[in-house]
Image (cartoon, rainbow, N blue to C red):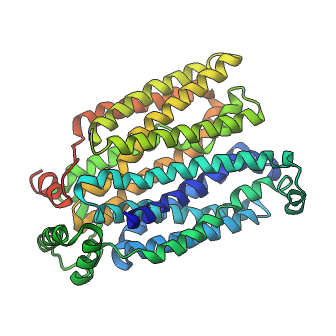
Amino acid sequence: MGTVLIVALSGFLMGFDGSLFTGAVVFVKKHFELSTFQVGWTNASQVVSATIAIFLAGPLADRVGRRTVLRGAAMLFAIAAVVSALAQGMVALIVGRLIGGLGIGAVLVAGPMYIAEIAPPALRGRMVTYQQLFIVIGIALAFVSNYLIVHVENFGFDWITTLHLADWNWRWMVGIGAVPAVIYLFALLWIPESPRWLAMHERLDAARRVLVRAHGAELAEAELEELRASLAREKSPHEARLRDLLAPELRAVLVVGVIVAIFQQITGISSVLAYANVIFERAGAAGDASFMQTVYVGLVNLVFTVLAMLLIDRVGRRPLLLFGLAGMGVSLALAAYGFSRAGETQSALVLAGLLGFVASFATSIGPVMWVLLSEIFPNRVRALAISCVGLVNSTICFLTQLLFPWQMERFGGAVTFAMYGVFALLGLLLLAKVLPETRGRSLEELEESLVRHH
C-alpha cells in the first residue's frame, strides 16, 4: 500500500503544478499585455508538450522502467516551476510551461501503469484512482494557494514585503510548484520497480521479491505464474509497434479507449479548471469572489473523487461512467442557461451548474478513464496503447483550452457550455453501446476475454 501511495502522489504534482496557472493567468495577461489568443496559447502550451510526452512515455517506460520515468517527471516539474517564476516575457513563460507539460505526460502514463501492474485485482480500480485522488487534491490546494497569495498582503507581516509576495503574486503562484516536486523526487527512492516490467525484462527473481513484499508469498506465486503465461503467449521478436495496435483482436478495445479519451476532454473539463477564475468573473463574480468560487470547484472535485474511489470496485466502471456523463450533460445545460440570465441569478446558476459538472466528472469519466486504460489492453502493448490513447486525449485537451477564450468571446458562455453539454450526451449514447465492465478481474483474465475472445 505504501508503494502505491507514493506512486499515486505523482498525481499531486500534476494537479498542483498544472493548476497554479489558473489563478496566475489573470495577472499574467495584465503583466505581459496579452491578447485573447495569446492567453489561450500560453495556457494550452503545456498541453502540447504533455501530448508529446504521453506518446513517448509508454515506450520509454517499457525501455527504462516505470519508476525511472516518474523520477524524470519529478525533475521536470521542479525545473518548470523555476523557469516559469523567473520568466521575463511570454516566450520564457511558455518554455516553462512546455517543460511542465513533459512531466504531466510522463505521470499520466507511468503512474496508472505502475499501480495497475502491482495492485491485486480486487483493489485495482480503487488503487489506480488513488492517483486521480491526488490529482484533485493537488488542484484543490493549488486553488487555495492562489487564493492565499492574492490575500497575503492583508496579513501585515514584514516578511511579505521582503519576499515581494504582493508585487510578484503570479510568480509565487507558479514558482511554489518546485517544493512538492523536490520532495517527491526523494520519496521515489523508496519504491521498487514494477513487477511486470521486471518480468518483461526476464528479471523474475526481482519480480517475485516485489510481489511477495506487496501481496505475500502465496498470492505472489500465483500472480507470477499468470504473468509468465501471459508473457509467453505474447512472446515477440520485437517491441510493440504502432501497427500491432491495429491487429483485429485489439480493434474493439482500442475503439473503447479512444472514445473514452475523446469524451473525457471534449466535454470541457480542462477549460473549466484552466479558466475557472475567468469564467466566474464573466458570470458576474467580483475579483475576490471568483477566486473563492474557484476554491469551491477544487473542493467539490476532491470530495467526489473520494466518492468515486469508494464506489469504483463496488459499483463497477461502466455504471459510474454512464451515470456521470448523464450528470455532466444536465449540469452543463444548467450552466449554459445561467449565462443566458442576468444579475445575481446568472452567477448563482453558473456556479451551481459548474459545481454539478465537476462533481459528475470526478465521480465518473475523470478517474474511470485511467482505470480502464490500465486494464483493457494486453501486457505486451499496454504501454504503447495507453500512450496512443493518451495522445488523443491530450490533443483534445489542447484544442479545448486553446479555443475556449475565443469561444467565450465569439459565442458567449451560453452557447459554449451548451456545446459541451451536447458532447456529454453524445458520449453517453456511444459508450452505453460499447463500454465493457472490467471490475474484479485480473489483467490476464481481461486479456483473455476482451482480446483473445473478442
Q: Is residue 105 above or below residue 352?
A: below
Q: Choose between 229 and 386: the one closer to the eye.
A: 229
Q: Residue at x 36, y 55 (%)?
A: 128
Is residue 263 visible to the viewer in this orientation of the structure? no
x then y, percent, for residue 320: 32, 37
Q: Position of residue 74 (x, y in %)?
A: 54, 70
Q: Seen in the image, is 245 located left or right of residue 365?
A: left
Q: Relative to residue 10, is residue 167 depicted above or below? A: above
Write down the quadrant of residue 306 in the picture.
top left
Could you tell me which residue is drawn at 42 percent across and 61 percent down? 5
Residue 315's quadrant in the figure? top left
Residue 224 in sight from this viewpoint: yes
Question: Residue at left 80%, top 64%?
Answer: 88
Residue 26, image x, y percentages: 74, 44
| Relative to 346, 452 lies left or right | left
Say if 26 sits above or below 222 in the image. above
- Number of callouts: 0
In the orientation shown, which residue stands out farthest toward the left? 453
The N terminus - image quarter: bottom left
The residue positioned 78% from the left and 61% from the top of the image is 89
- Where residue 82 appears, as percent x and y from the top left, is 70, 68
Q: In screen coordinates, is 326 left or right of 349? A: left
